């Protein structure tokens, strides 16, 4: 082929998502309604009825371009969190925010720092612009922030931290995170990805919005894909200093967030009960699964998210379990691409979904 692309593009390993239900139905021949997807950390409760009504009421409006400024969503976020609307940027999923951060603050040859076993998108958005990804070794599957500090160089422009992290579910203590931010030079942008914050107990919940005045180089990113259940609409947001938000807005596509996503996200912010119930169901489902792992003597990484990664003997055994579950209509996620080949990650489902997972996990005869 005569099309030549830079090596940093041809060397990218594409992102591997959870297998879609329709694909499994097609490939394995199981009816869609018999398939249980526990592979992408979606909310098994679906979406808030308030958001669903708002979407239905707005369907007629989709012949118009969306509001490129996301005015009403920013107002709603501003009221909820007592932060200026100018400090928010809305993205086509929070992945859009992660990518915007890379495209705004990193140029070719710059270094981007993230952890071993951290969310795959950090490496991808860095590679796509010719940045150099630098992976800090983890400690007990968790971010080791001292390792981060020791890897900072003149070339470091951006740091990604997932808290809680996916696929390990580990959480960094607030005090440790704050000490870390104190030690990061001000000319390096730090993105704290808090896609799973809604699932944390009150005492563990992030307080980073309150830190924004002290750290002008901090961007906090949030998602509507997980607890809010809007994964298919693609919407998330970033919060930072007005200065950084204005820079990212120059790079952002003018209509990056669709109309229904804006409507649904704005409506769902008002439904506290839905988020609370999602958190409770997640908590009991997490216990259901971790109790099972203990009973079966399977090691797992204690998780603060709506998923948990558990360990089999080796990669071959992990893939045998994966296929056994898949052939019985249960989709989980292999995470070899996170350098965790002996592990599988399962999202917490509703009780009967977890029971089905447990049934086929228990009867996999190796
Ligand atoms: C799922 C996930 C996201 C969310 O991505 P969206 O683009 O908002 O769907 C972000 N960060 C982490 C760590 C995740 O696991």
Image (spheres, rainbow, N blue to C red):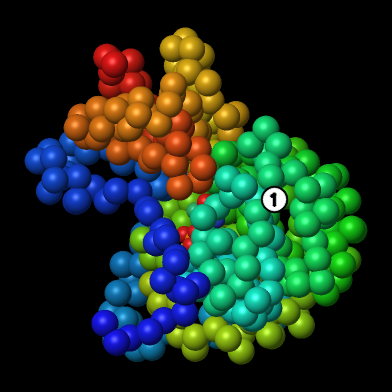
Residue 147 position in % (x across, y down): 78, 48
Identified at 19% across, 32% down, the residue is 327
Residue at numbered disc 1: 136
Q: Is residue 36 above or below residue 136?
A: above
| For residue 232, side relative to residue 152 (left or right) | left
Front residue of 173/224: it is 173
Q: Position of residue 329 (x, y in %)?
A: 22, 34
- Quadrant position of the N terminus in the picture: bottom left
For label 1, being within 8 Å of ligand 1 is answered no
In the image, taking residue 198 as reference, residue 174 lies left or right, namely right
Q: Residue at 45% x, 16% y: name it.
A: 292
Question: Residue placed at 51% from the left, 55% from the top?
Answer: 120
Q: Is residue 91 above or below residue 287?
A: below
Above or below residue 146? Residue 253 is below
User: Which structural element holds mark 1?
Assistant: strand
- Viewport quadrant of the C terminus: top left
Residue displayed at 57% across by 69% down: 126
Q: Nearer the viewer, residue 240 or 158?
A: 158
């Amino acid at each position: 082929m005569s099309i030549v692309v830079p090596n940093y593009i041809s060397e990218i390993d594409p992102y591997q998502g959870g297998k879609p239900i329709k694909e499994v139905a097609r490939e394995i021949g199981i009816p869609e309604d018999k398939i249980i997807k526990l592979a992408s950390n979606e909310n098994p409760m679906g979406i808030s009825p308030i958001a669903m009504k708002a979407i239905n009421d707005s369907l007629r409006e989709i012949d118009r371009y969306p509001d490129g400024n996301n005015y009403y969503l920013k107002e709603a976020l501003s009221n909820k969190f007592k932060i200026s609307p100018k400090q928010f940027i809305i993205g086509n999923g929070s992945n859009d925010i992660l990518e915007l951060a890379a495209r705004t603050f990193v140029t070719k040859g710059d270094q981007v720092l993230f952890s071993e076993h951290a969310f795959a998108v950090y490496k991808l958005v860095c590679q796509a612009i010719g940045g150099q990804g630098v992976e800090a070794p983890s400690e007990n599957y968790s971010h080791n922030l001292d390792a981060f500090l020791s890897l900072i160089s003149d070339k470091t422009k951006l740091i990604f931290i997932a808290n809680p992290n996916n696929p390990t579910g580990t959480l960094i203590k607030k005090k440790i995170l704050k000490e870390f931010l104190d030690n990061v030079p001000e000319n390096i942008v730090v993105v704290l990805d808090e896609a799973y914050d809604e699932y944390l107990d009150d005492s563990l919940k992030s307080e980073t919005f309150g830190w924004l005045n002290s750290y002008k180089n901090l961007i906090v990113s949030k998602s509507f894909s997980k607890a809010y259940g809007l994964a298919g609409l693609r919407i998330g947001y970033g919060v930072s200093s007005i200065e950084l938000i204005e820079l990212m807005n120059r790079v952002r596509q003018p209509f990056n967030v669709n109309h229904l996503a804006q409507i649904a996200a704005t409506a769902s912010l008002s439904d506290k009960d839905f988020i609370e119930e999602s958190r409770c169901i997640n908590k009991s489902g997490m216990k259901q699964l971790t109790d099972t792992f203990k009973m079966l003597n399977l090691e797992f990484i204690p998780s603060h998210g709506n998923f948990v990664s558990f360990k089999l003997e080796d990669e071959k055994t992990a893939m045998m379990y994966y296929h056994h579950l898949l052939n019985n209509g249960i989709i989980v996620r292999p995470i070899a691409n996170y350098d965790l080949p002996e592990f599988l990650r399962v999202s917490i489902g509703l009780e009967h979904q977890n029971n089905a997972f447990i049934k086929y996990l228990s009867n996999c005869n190796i």
